[in-house]
Amino acid sequence: MIGRKEEKKFLQSLIYEEEPQFVAVFGRRRIGKTYLVRESFNHRFFFQHTGISNQSIKPGLRKQAQLDKFAESLREAGYACEERLGSWDEAFRKLKEAITHSQEEKKIIFIDELSWMDTKESGLISALESFWNGWVTARHEKDVILIVCASATYWIMDNIVNARGGLHNRLTGQIHLTPFTLKECEEYLQSKKIVFTRHQILQCYMIIGGVPYYWSLLKKGKSLPQNIDDLFFRENAPLQNEYDNLYCALFNKPDQYMKIVEALSKVTKGITRDEVCRRTGIASSGELTKKLRELENCGFIRKYVPFGFKEKNSLYQLIDNYTLFYYKFLRQRSFDENYWKNQINTPKLNAWSGISFEKVCLEHIPQLKKALGISGVQTDINTWHCQADPERGIYGSQIDLLIVRKDQIINVCEMKYADTEYLVDAAFDREQKRKMSDFRNKTKTKYALHSTLVTTYGVANNAYAGELQAVITSDDLFQ
């Protein structure tokens, strides 16, 4: 298994606990939750069940379809369930009977895609509460390990992790499974005998992010452009319809979520809540707040407060690599099976590369800190912008990454994607100094400002390069 060492170690340690264990594993779709749980226990479960997607089931039939599938899982596990289940209370009663009659020392129960099972007025959560609070924890035997998973991160956060009802504070552990880092993607390719350079791995990450399932579709013996054409642009390509599948699988009514994501895809630096309303036509309300939070919990967008601003000035930014790629290249689908091979060095690709590289850098903050030698230093990660104010000597600036350090230094980071060593010229030097001047004049900071460049291959050696306090390369991002 690539990565996930701490997560696997934690799951395996549950077997040796002397109390019942209730663990939630969550993370975006295709991130490897099911694989992690199954591999950690060598596919050996007392009972396992996976909820079924409701997309193809009529609304009035969804609850019964989920119950029928649960009964089928009971039978497949060898437990009697002849009568048709009519409620989740009945379903968990059957599970209790199976547990009671089992001779296994530890009953490891794995319920996957729990959110799909929670159909309208299903009673699932109250039945789960009764099962855990009223039965499992009350038994003399302390032999149950219950692991629940869901791709709908917002749902599991609201209903399990941060539950306010009977499941409040009932979890004994939780795992938020995050995307692979660049280093883990490199290790994964090596395990599959796929030979890419680090620059090619970086380019691939800019397209599909660190989602393990997407990386599993790459084929050895093919170049990166060939692989991208195969994944997205040839006829019946496996990821051609991933956008609709992704959002429909996570959200019951995905249209408004897609509207929000589309609006954010048209800007690079983020927009305010009011601007989200204006661009989408969605009214400002508690429902909009909920949708924005759900998209954030699922890892598609981020909410951040620029340096020196207040919460009311928060900005929302699209950060999901695949979604960004979709809106740039896939939405207006090309029928050219060699589309990506033919995009090399086009203005469209070059513009996207710069923006996407910035997102990859933001996903690798620990690696940036390590390269700066400040892994153990407390930091705040931020952005900053200001409007022009000529009377105060402020020209108007945007800084996409500030690393504000406890040791009274602020790294003012500029991120530049390049195919060769980056040439720091007079224009870059002038722009960077202007940004730092604006920042100091506007914020009145007493911290030292370090001009920092993050680029792919480092910098060409010249007088202007000597003005930089630090240079971080893409190799550093692989650490």
Image (cartoon, rainbow, N blue to C red):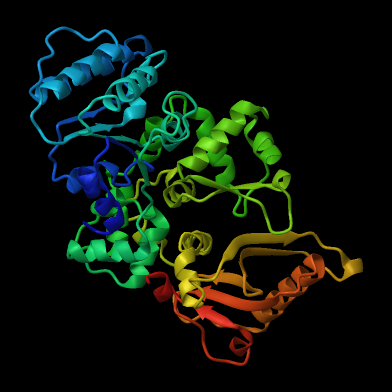
Query: At x 18% / y 47%, what residue is drawn?
Result: 39
Where, by quadrant of the figure, is residue 450 drawn? bottom right
In the image shown, does 250 or 146 lie closer to the viewer? 146
- Residue 159: x percent and y percent? 44, 29
- Image vertical order of residue 259 relative to residue 82, above or below: below
In the image shown, does 216 or 22 lie closer to the viewer? 22
- Residue 182: x percent and y percent? 36, 64
Query: At x 11% / y 10%, what residue is drawn?
Result: 82
- Residue 225: x percent and y percent? 32, 61
State the quadrant of the N terminus: bottom left
Q: Is residue 59 left or right of residue 256?
A: left
Query: At x 60% / y 62%, what residue is drawn?
Result: 380
In the image shown, does 398 or 143 lie closer to the viewer? 143
Q: Is residue 272 left or right of residue 41?
A: right
Q: How many marks?
A: 0
- Image vertical order of residue 71 relative to residue 344, above or below: above
Query: At x 25% / y 47%, what residue is drawn?
Result: 11
Most extreme residue toward the right is 391
Work out whether residue 478 can be spotted. yes
Q: Is residue 184 left or right of residue 369?
A: left
- Residue 107: x percent and y percent? 17, 33
Work out whether residue 418 can be spotted. no
- Image vertical order of residue 82 relative to residue 377, above or below: above
State the quadrant of the C terminus: bottom left
- Image vertical order of residue 425 relative to residue 269, above or below: below
Q: Is residue 388 left or right of residue 324?
A: right
Where, by quadrant of the figure, is residue 398 drawn? bottom right
